[in-house]
Amino acid sequence: MNMKLTATVSALVLALTAGAGLAQTTLTGVRDLNDQLDDQERDINKDIARANDSYRFGNPSFRDGLSGSASLGYSGKTGNNESQELNAGVRLRYASGPLVQTLGAAINYADTAGVNTKEDVFAVYDANYYFNDKVYGFVLGRVSTDGLATTAADNAIDGFLGFGPGYRLINTEKTTWRIQAGLGVSYLEDGTGASDTEMGYIASSRLFYAFNENVFATMDTDILKTDSALRINNDLGVNMKMTDAFSTRVSYLTEYNDSRAIRSDNKLGVSLVYGF
């Protein structure tokens, strides 16, 4: 079990940033600390915001047409240590009435001293058609590739395409619960080029319960069953906004795969944000 306890203080970030002269160099460590605190606070706020599922209460009110965003980041070092890293991503959404389609992709590339250390590509296609407030259909496709995979134990390509119906069992301001299930095809290719294509079944559950206006719990469960493995991910989280200045999230993530020697990985996370 991995345990993580992270606390960030917004006022500290602001105070350090105020020293503009010092922040121009990493020699003093001030800018490095600023960056680390900013990253921690952003990650925590993203975890809390992600728990507020935009699809929780039905078809989100996305504007019709195409929208999206793209990002590109590059860094390179020369001298005693030579390395470079490239990260690129894109998110596209097309909404047309009851149909909402989303495509996201990320590319990560890195090399050190002329040797490639990372060649990863990850993409997800997600489409939902809302027949009414309770019934919808979905199509879900994902693929991840590892350009450095060379052995039978490495996944060079891991892909899945599935579709099926979804249904909202409960849809109130205090409690929402939706489930979806369907059929699909799983494709795996290892680093030696050997591949395996299997029929699979996918099922998901999204449960939300609000104790009050400041405290709510979520439990997100995903199940993928193929001939070779049963994989289950379950993320249980409690989000609390104690005051305008203090927010916290406690989560427990379980990843189960019956094809591994140790089938379950568990992670406890405690994230705190406090500003004054």
Image (tube, rainbow, N blue to C red):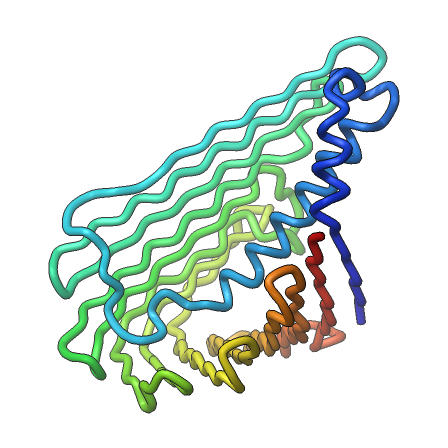
Which residue is more in the foreground, 232 or 219? Answer: 219
- Single out the residue that lies furthest toward the bottom: 169
Residue located at (55% from left, 40% from top): 120
Which residue is more in the foreground, 243 or 179? Answer: 243
- Asked if 113 appears above or below 14 in the picture, the reply is above
- Single out the residue that lies furthest toward the top: 79
Question: Residue 110 at x, y = what percent?
Answer: 64, 29
The image quadrant where one finds the N terminus is: bottom right
User: Could one spot residue 259 in this view of the protein?
Assistant: no
User: Could one spot residue 126 in this view of the protein?
Assistant: yes
Q: Where, by quadrant of the figure, is residue 73 drawn? A: top right
Residue located at (32% from left, 68% from top): 162
- Single out the residue that lies furthest toward the right: 28
Q: How many marks?
A: 0
- Asked if 244 appears above or below 74 in the picture, the reply is below
Which residue is more in the foreground, 149 or 274? Answer: 274
Q: Where, by quadrant of the figure, is residue 139 drawn? A: bottom left
Question: Residue 34 at x, y = what percent?
Answer: 74, 34
Which residue is more in the foreground, 211 or 81? Answer: 211
Question: Residue 206 at x, y = what percent?
Answer: 43, 79
Relative to residue 88, is residue 180 drawn left or right? left
Relative to residue 269, is residue 149 drawn left or right? left
Residue located at (43% from left, 57% from top): 159
Residue located at (42% from left, 48% from top): 123
Question: Residue 232 at x, y = what percent?
Answer: 56, 77
Q: Where, by quadrant of the figure, is residue 37 drawn? A: top right
